[in-house]
Structure formats: C-alpha cells, structure tokens
Amino acid sequence: MFTPFELSGIGLHSAMKTTVKVSPAPQGKGRYFVRVDLPDKPIIHANVDSIETTTLSTELGNGEAKIRTVEHLLASLVGCGIEDAEICIDGCEVPLLDGSAQNWVEQIDYKCENPFADVTETIEAEIWVRKGDAFCAVIPSSEMKFSCGVDYPYPVLQNQWYSWYPQREHFVSSIAPARTFGFADQIKQLQEAGLIKGGSLDNALVCDYSGWLNPPLRFENEAVRHKLLDFIGDLSLLGKIPRAHYLAYKASHQLHTELAKKIKSRSI
C-alpha cells in the first residue's frame, strides 16, 4: 500500500498541462486511468486490450476517451511493486516531467526491492517480433532480466547495450532516473507533424552528430537505460509480467506492445 500523491506538468506531444493523482486501488483491480475531465469519468484500463497508437509514445483508449504517454508512470508503478493503482488525470496526456521516471518514484512511498520476486508465471517458449533489423523477444529464463540495445548513426549513441537484473539492482536508482532523448535534426519535422510540442532541453536529452547538446548525463549509457524504462512500461500492460528474459534491440513502442500482445495471446 502507498500514500496517494499528485503531480502536474506538461505533456511531451500535446504541450498541455495536466494533473495526475495516483491512489491505491482495491486488490486485483490492476492499474487504470480515470479521465476526470470527461463526462462520466471514463476508465481506461492499463492493459494490452486498451492499446490504441504507439507513435513515439504509448496511447491507451476506451471508446472516445484516450490517454497518451503512459509508459514512464506505468514503469514507475511496476518498478516499485505496485500492481493496483487508480490514476486520475484531467487531460489526454501524462506529464513528461523531467523526461524520466525519477519524479514519479520519488512520490511513491512504497518501494519493493525486487518487484518480480513473487512472480510465478513463466514463459515456456521463445517469442519474437521483428521490423527490419529491429526486434523484441522473450526467452525462457530461470530469473527475471531485461536487456536492451540501441545503435543510431550519431557517434554518442552507437552500439549501446544494457541488461537489468531486478534482483541485483533497484529500479529506483538504476532505471528510473534515465531521461528520454531525441535528435536535433528531427525536431522540426516532428513538431510539424504535431508531435513533441512539449519537448525541451529541460525534459529531454538532445544530441546531434557532434554530441549531446545538454549534458551532463545521469549515466554514461543513459539513452539505452531509458529505452529499457519504456520497454518495462509497455510490458506492464500485461498486468503481471511473467518470469523470463526480455530483449529489445532498436525497438519502438510498436514492437514493445506487439510483443506484449503475443505474450498475452499465447496463454488464451
């Protein structure tokens, strides 16, 4: 159980300010959003069946009600061991805050050292999803682990890999502080497409071919750790994540959620 908390900020894509209040939910209810700004306050469950779009963030929906950029907050709840939570929000996008999950976990006064210690469900066979040379996979493993790789044309982001073992490193210190990142030569095009309107050097790392425009980094490999944060947030849509080794290479929210859907469908 944790104490309810509230945070406000602007959305990465919408640039609209929203306020989020997170409270404990009854056991077994899972994690879900409540759009308190809409008539009848529709509920959007944070599960695979609610996935809508995955362009530079993960969006969930229930009919006309939508909620975007859910991955950092959901990863924070999972990383702290919170399975049941009501997330009330007065807009269509979760605040980006500083671009990481750090502000969220600082508000959570319940933190489980290893949130996957009691997982009993396991993966019995490999599952892969691919797009070009990018892929996500889940492989049977006796212990829980997550591995992520990136390889961009920018010198500071070439050939980075990182593996996180929840039983060895705490989510709060090793994953949550890693901030989102972007590329200077893509900003104008994305903004013209109606994306990242709320992005800035205060809430995202930005690089070009000469290096990072707004150092210092919190980790030498902060970018790949952030991709792993996103991966965990998207996998949280399974509810309880089965014990296995999860891998993502050059992956996107689309591949993350496609893997989650295949994992769910294998047990139906």
Image: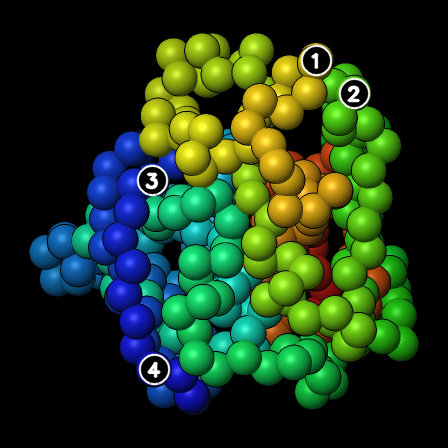
Contact, mark 3 vs mark 1 (Cβ under 8 Å): no
Report the residue at 54% width, 79% height from top. 111
CA distance separating discs 4 and 3: 24 Å
Q: Is residue 152 above or below residue 237?
A: above
Q: Which residue is mark 2?
A: 155
CA distance separating discs 2 and 3: 29 Å
> Which comes before the other along the chain, label 3 or label 1?
3
CA distance separating discs 3 and 1: 27 Å
Query: Residue 177's quadrant in the figure?
Result: bottom right
> Which comes before the other along the chain, label 4 or label 3?
4
> Which comes before the other along the chain, label 1 or label 2?
2
Q: Which residue is mark 3?
A: 11
Determine if residue 6 is in view. Answer: yes
Going by the numbered disc 2, the residue's amino acid type is Pro
Determine if residue 43 is in view. Answer: no
Residue 180 locus on image (x, y percent): 55, 39
Helix, strand or loop status at disc 3? loop
For residue 209, the mark is 1
Residue 235 locus on image (x, y percent): 62, 58
Q: Is residue 65 above or below residue 196?
A: below
Report the residue at 14% width, 53% height from top. 38
